Image (tube, grey):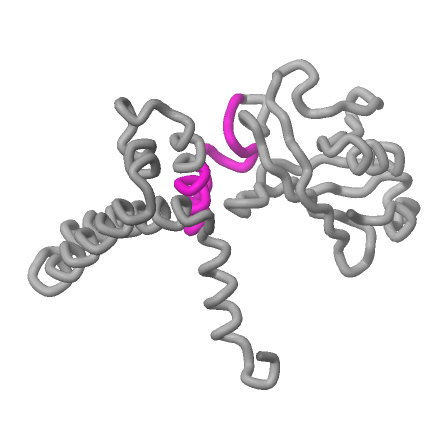
Amino acid sequence: MIDPDTVDFDKGGGLIPAIVQDADTLQVLTLAYMDRAALAETIQSGEATFISRSRGGRWRKGETSGDRLFVRQIIADCDGDAVVVKVRPVGNACHLNRVSCFGDEDAPGLGRLARLERTIAERAEADPAESWTARLLAEGPKRAAQKVGEEGVETALAGAAGDDAELASEAADLIYHLLVLLKARGLSSQDVLDVLAARAAPKGDR
């Protein structure tokens, strides 16, 4: 975790901006401010704690709403006078009961895959009689792998002879079942992304 002594609080009159970002989807959730004490409390408690410029005091997300921001990582910018706080949110970050203070959209772009992966993990605890995801996971990796094979064939057929809507629909089914298979094997999409990153690295960096 970050060392508060490496952060420049003086430049902003004792405060630094804290950009709060979902650690999984990378969606920006809110912008708040911290002083040294708030940053230290955040590190110690593991929950995002800020300073309210309007109220002139500290506040921790969730004390009144029940929505929480559990900190995964804090990174300072190149000048050391601002931080990105990567969190695992429980509930909404915005006081208007929205996921993000920056618009209504939930996990836009590729962040949607991370949101789906989080949903799959939650469904794993559901009753297999009521959840297809829970049923697949209960039946084990072989069953999930079978579904990936089936969906892969259907996606290929749609790509060869179907229209755009059919291909997009079949590709969505394939991605969903692939994420279930990864979950069944104890892996995540990040493991796949790590492999892709290694393949994309310059040859001298491998």
Q: Is residue 124 left or right of residue 26?
A: left
Considering every residue shown, the one lying at the far left of the view is 161
Q: How many discs mark residues in the rendered view? A: 0
Q: Is residue 133 left or right of residue 93?
A: left
Q: Is residue 130 left or right of residue 158?
A: right
Residue at the image position 54 percent from the left and 76 percent from the top? 201
Front residue (pair 84, 68): 68
| Magenta residues (range) | 97-118
> Vertical placement of 200 versus 1: above or below?
below
Residue at the image position 54 percent from the left and 22 percent from the top? 96
Residue at the image position 35 percent from the left and 44 percent from the top? 180
Front residue (pair 19, 47): 47
Q: Is residue 14 left or right of residue 173?
A: right
Residue 26 picture location, percent across and down: 54, 47
Front residue (pair 83, 139): 139
In magenta segment, residue 98: yes
Residue at the image position 19 percent from the left and 52 percent from the top? 151
Residue 15 picture location, percent across and down: 84, 39
Residue 142 picture location, percent across and down: 28, 49
Q: Quadrant of residue 35?
A: top right
Residue 136 picture location, percent across and down: 29, 38
Q: Quadrant of the C terminus?
A: bottom right
